[in-house]
Amino acid sequence: MPQRFRLVSLLADGRFHSGEELGRALGVGRAAVWKLVKGIEAWGLEVFAVSGRGYRLSEPLELLDRALILADMRPEARVLLAGLDVLPGTDSTNRNLMERAAQGLASGFACLAEHQWAGRGRQGRDWISPFGANLYLSVLWRFEDAPAALASLSLAAAVAVARALADMGVQDIGLKWPNDILWQERKLSGILLEMAGEPAGPCYVVAGVGLNVNMPPASGDLIDQSWVDLRGIVGRPLARNPIAAGLLSRLLEALETFSHHGLSPFRAEWRRLDCIQGRTISISSPGGGAQQGTALGTDESGALRVDVDGHVRRFHSGEVSVRTRP
Ligand code: BTN
């Protein structure tokens, strides 16, 4: 186990620990403890250092616990899980699984990390991933279909996240095409799907979900869009292990259902949660250029239908922003 992670485990109770005590437990001197503290601050943790008392985290930390997560999963999902890694840190859980998928990792394998140092968002953005604060989860799924047939999987994955949030009693969730999960117009969770495979053959997908749970303010300041975390919604810090279990369960179930039935079992729920339908939006295409119109909902392939100057146009990819005027 890396020394930095051992230090976090020692500090997780939120109490003061002297440099001497920490050094003894880690088998290093006090100067090395100080260096390790700087290292965990770089992970996004807030550490108070008080002379004569030692170090403590700004608040206690509940670390991810593989056994608790497995025990809390929905039984119908547990049988779909091929394996689960819970890592102290990785560059990106998506990249981690994409690499191992190429070497034959089994469908249904999942990876959670306490921290990502190169978390990936959609459209080439970063996903801010401080240690121990939120959930960063990826699941590998193999499909018989060619990659092009899976365009609408984004929407099914978003419905899965909305289901996990509904299981926890979170209300007022809205979905913004293609797969943003919003609460009162602020981003709570995002999904990044990455695929590889032959144009006409089987392929695999890594579905990655980032869910803001207890975002530290200093990390939140780095996010360049309006965001919210579960703590902000329910008004208190939340235990991440049961949330991870619910999220993983709903995602696995959705991947399994989608592989047999496609988007149709998800469409009614998508329509109910669609928070841009009827609104004036601007949609920018990956290749550049933006169009404005009225969002009309999605079609059976998951494409967004937009009324642009009286003509219905379909968008298969792009970034939507909602215009403030009605
Ligand atoms: C978005 O921009 O809305 C998508 C964000 C997806 C973030 C998750 S966190 C787990 C997984 N690993 C990554 O590097 N990205 C996804």
Image: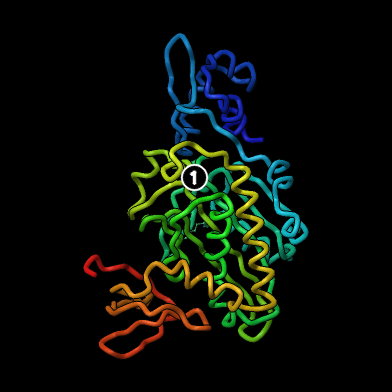
Asked whether, in this view, residue 228 is left or right of residue 208, the answer is left
Residue 306, by quadrant, is: bottom left
Of residues 36 and 195, the one drawn nearer to the viewer in this rendering? 195
> How many labels, in total?
1
In the rendered view, would you say 207 is above or below 239? below
Of residues 90 and 230, the one drawn nearer to the viewer in this rendering? 230
Residue 14, given in percent of the width and then of the height, sits at: 52, 24
Asked whether, in this view, residue 177 is left or right of residue 238, the answer is left
Residue 300, given in percent of the width and then of the height, sits at: 52, 83
Q: Is residue 154 visible?
A: no
Residue 174, given in percent of the width and then of the height, sits at: 43, 62
Residue lying at 40% horizontally and 49% vertically, measured from the top left: 228
Residue lying at 40% horizontally and 85% vertically, measured from the top left: 314
In the rendered view, would you say 312 is above or below 260? below
Residue placed farthest to the right in the image?
Answer: 79
Residue placed farthest to the left in the image?
Answer: 325
Residue lying at 40% horizontally and 42% vertically, measured from the top left: 219
Residue placed farthest to the bottom in the image?
Answer: 311
Where does the C terminus fall, quadrant-wise? Answer: bottom left
Where does the N terminus fall, quadrant-wise? Answer: top right
The secondary structure type at the circle numbered 1 is: loop
Q: Mark 1 points at which residue?
A: 213
Q: Can residue 198 be seen in this view?
A: yes
